[in-house]
Amino acid sequence: MEWLINMDRAALVRIGVWLLTGLVVVASFLVLTGMRYIPNNKVGIVEKLWSLHGHVREGRLMALPGQTGYQMAVLRGGMYFFFWRWLYRIHKQPLVPQHLFLAGTAAGTDGAREGVPQPGQGLLGTLISLLVAEKTGWPTSVRQSPGSPPGSPPGEKAGS
């Protein structure tokens, strides 16, 4: 530290100017590359603010590629580039702990597109259903008939 005390004023000013220049260069790089950081305990929901390709059509929730609105991309924790602040808004939302998904009386997911159920069963639903069945003894069927009590075979109605 003695070398810092013995420096003349001009040398200290030069060091300060170099540090400030370096800080400006790094900040400019981050802004020009559109860098965004998502913490590992959150996800980023991408919203495109403007586009030459139009906006989301009435009755739809998600934008098609190139349209303005909420994009289909969800960003996991990490650093992302080319999401400029004048073009994209990133909504950072907390992750939901896994135990909240498995706390219900029946676990599983069905595929859906904008709220309309799609045929077939997703892989995630199958895996969660098998995990729940292994830990709790519940049935492995993801698809329960409406009104059937938990633990009953598929197709059995309550009170039958």
Image (tube, rainbow, N blue to C red):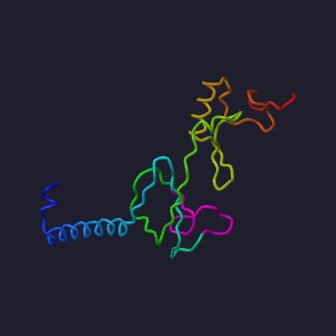
Query: What's the magenta bit mostly, secondary-structure-wise?
Result: loop
* Quarter in which the C terminus is drawn: top right
Is 45 magenta? The answer is no
- x, y percentage for residue 126? 60, 35
Q: Name which residue lies at 17% across and 54% down.
A: 1
Which region is colored magenta?
56-73
Q: Position of residue 58 (x, y in %)?
A: 67, 69
Image quadrant in which you'd find residue 79: bottom left
109 w.r.t. 47: above or below: above
Q: Is residue 152 left or right of residue 88?
A: right
Task: Please name whichever residue, 42 or 152, is drawn nearer the observer in this view of the structure.
Answer: 42
Residue drawn where x is 64% and y is 69% of the image: 57
Q: Is residue 66 magenta?
A: yes
Quadrant in the rendering for residue 33: bottom left
The furthest residue to the bottom: 52
Q: Residue at x 63, y 35 (%)?
A: 102
In this rendering, the answer to whether 81 lies above or below 132 is below
The answer to whether residue 135 is left or right of residue 4 is right
> Is 49 placed above or below 120 here?
below
Where is residue 96 shown, x and y percent of the image? 58, 44
Front residue of 63/36: it is 36
Q: Report the side of 124 relative to 139 (left or right).
A: left
